[in-house]
Image: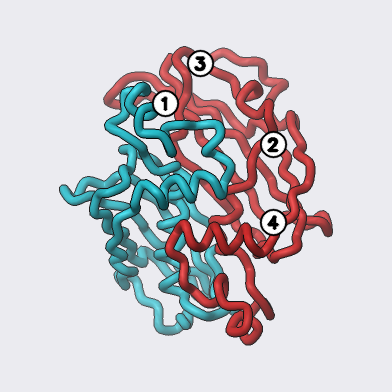
Chain colours: A cyan, B red
Amino acid sequence: MKNFDEVNIGDTLGPLELTVTKDQCRAYAKTSGFGEVAGRFTDEAAAKKEGLPGIILPGNMSLGLLSKLVTDWIGFGGARLIRMGTTYRVPVQPDHALTIHGFVTNTNPDDRTAEIDIWIENEEAERLVTGTATVEFPK
Amino acid sequence: MVDFDPTIINKVFEHTDPVEVKPEMIKRFCESLGENNPLYTDPEAAKTGPYGGIVAPPSFAVTFRNGRHFFEHIPRFGRRGFDAGKDVEFVAPIHPGDTISLSSHVKEIYEKTGRTGTMVFVVIRSTLTNQKNETVAHIDHRFMNRP
């Protein structure tokens, strides 16, 4: 559990190292109802037909993984992820080693919030998805 | 400057029927993301947490489906737009048993010129409301078009 008083600018979150399997990607697409609309998240042939190298992760799944980095950092406590912004720069592929990073860029004692930069990297340290998050700590 | 009908801004074009959040939906969502925080996965442990029981992970908010005609209401400029990113405000946690409906409007349209040429961004805001008519989240979808 994370308290506001122990958060400092420059603190790092994670890194979270993971590989999303194609099945996980399909499972996510299914939970959010995207599977029916977009074959590029579930079907290898459909994705290639769109000019993609194969199945890609739904943008929302990347957002979910970035959100998990932040909520893992918060742990079992009352601090809350209250805002997240993402930019999808390069499609994220399953079966590739991904690393999810974050660091605290600012803290605001008045409203007990922390600003965090977050991003997903591939094996070549290329930033596929970048974003920012705000966490609010209990008063 | 990009040309569009200004009266579409802020006009709600869609309001979806409420969807009940079943515990299995949260469970499956957590599994697909490898989620293991007891706040979202362990009903017993979550009782002692800040919400008095399981809640959905914040990013569950982006999984609610827009209505069937959602994409027809997104203004297009040139080639088909793609999902450039999202800005989400998580206003309140989503609890199992909540019923969530979603209403959407065009929030803004703006042009940007970068290294790769001119881009037109269309921002659609979807607001999630629960059964008590409380706002749960605002989701700004950023669609990028190349005219």
Which residue bears the numbered disc 1?
Answer: B112
Camera-side residue: B60 or A20? A20
Q: CA distance from mark 2 to mark 4?
A: 14 Å
Question: To which quarter of the image does residue B71 belong?
Answer: top right
Dot 3 or dot 4: first in sequence order is 3
Numbered tag placed on residue B136 in the rendering: 4
Dot 2 or dot 1: first in sequence order is 2
Question: To which quarter of the image does residue B119 belong?
Answer: top left
| Residue B59 appears anywhere in the view | yes
x 74%, y 32%: residue: B14
Report the side of A8 relative to B17 (left or right): left
The x, y position of residue B122, in whole percent, is 54, 28
Number of marks in the image? 4
x 36%, y 58%: residue: A117
Mark 3 chain: B
Q: CA distance from mark 4 to mark 1?
A: 31 Å
Label 3: few (<14), some or many (≥20) within 10 Å? some
Q: Are marks 2 and 4 on the same chain?
A: yes
Q: CA distance from mark 2 to mark 1?
A: 23 Å
Callout 2, which amino acid?
Answer: Ser
Mark 4 chain: B
Callout 1, which amino acid?
Answer: Lys
Dot 3 or dot 2: first in sequence order is 3
Which residue bears the numbered disc 3?
Answer: B77
Callout 3, which amino acid?
Answer: Phe
Dot 4 or dot 1: first in sequence order is 1
| Residue A139 appears anywhere in the view | no
- Relative to residue B44, is residue B28 depicted above or below? above
Which residue bears the numbered disc 2?
Answer: B104
Mark 1 chain: B
The x, y position of residue B65, in whole percent, is 64, 41
